[in-house]
Amino acid sequence: MDFVYPPGATPLDPDEAAGLIPIHITTQGDLNAWEQLNILQGDRWAARQNMRELLDEGFVRDLHRQMFNKTWRWAGTFRSSNKNIGVDWTQVSVKLRELLDNTRYQIDREVFDADEIAVRFHHQLVWVHAFSNGNGRHARLMSDLLVMRLGRPRLSWGSDFLATHSVDQLREQYIAGLRAADQGHIGELLAFARS
């Protein structure tokens, strides 16, 4: 199968692409639909994890595994190569640990409100880019879980925006918010997360 990557997506290397589990998938549309079903199963799994510590490397990996375990053999495994985004692959575990610790500190000290803590966490988790693929979707679900634990409703991630715009425009808006956050301006991503 030839993968078609939307702008801003992380291409898979041949070894990662060979980790595709379902043999019936022949198009990008098939893959997208299959992954979405797998992600919904991961979401349901996450909803039952009330007693688990979210800001824990084990949970981060388990969630990715639950979201993609029917799609990719390497689901839940940190990437072992560099990508077009993210920290050096040898630093994934270290940078993730720093992010989890920093987020705990922000919560304990109430450095930001709950939405901003979750959106900053999302931005940094995407920046770490711990996995070969699925990082944005994983980071959005992690952030949703975090903000709900902090007593706020789940983030909408542009669902209101989608009512009047295309999926491509939604993706462009999301990526623009991430890029602004890369420059230290979290407001655009924060607004998008609640749009």
Image (cartoon, helix red, strand yellow):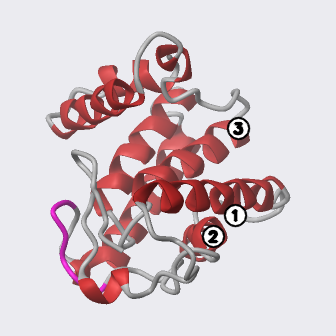
Residues under labels 3 and 2: Cα distance? 16 Å
Residues under labels 3 and 1: Cα distance? 13 Å
Image quarter of the N terminus: bottom left
What x and y, as percent, mark residue 132? Answer: 35, 73
Q: Which residues are magenta?
A: 80-85
Q: Amino acid at mark 1?
A: Glu
Mark 3: few/some/many CA within 10 Å (<14, 14-19, 20+): some
Q: Amino acid at mark 3?
A: Met
> Tag 3's secondary structure?
helix
Could you tell which of marks 1 and 2 lies nearer the N-terminus? 1
Q: Nearer the viewer, mark 1 or mark 2?
A: 2
> Tag 2's secondary structure?
helix
Q: Amino acid at mark 2?
A: Phe
Q: Which mark is residue 59?
A: 2
Q: Nearer the viewer, residue 131 or 171?
A: 171
What x and y, as percent, mark residue 31? Answer: 50, 62
What x and y, as percent, mark residue 5? Answer: 27, 55
Q: Nearer the viewer, mark 3 or mark 1?
A: 3
Dot 3 and dot 1 residues touching (CB under 8 Å): no
Q: Which mark is residue 168?
A: none
Query: Is residue 174 one of those drawn in magenta?
Result: no
Q: Nearer the viewer, residue 167 or 90?
A: 167
Identify the residue shown where x is 64% and y is 76%.
70
For label 3, the residue is: 148
Residues under labels 1 and 2: Cα distance? 7 Å
For label 1, the residue is: 53
User: Where 135 sits versus 18, above or below?
Assistant: above
Dot 3 and dot 2 residues touching (CB under 8 Å): no
What x and y, as percent, mark residue 95? Answer: 31, 69
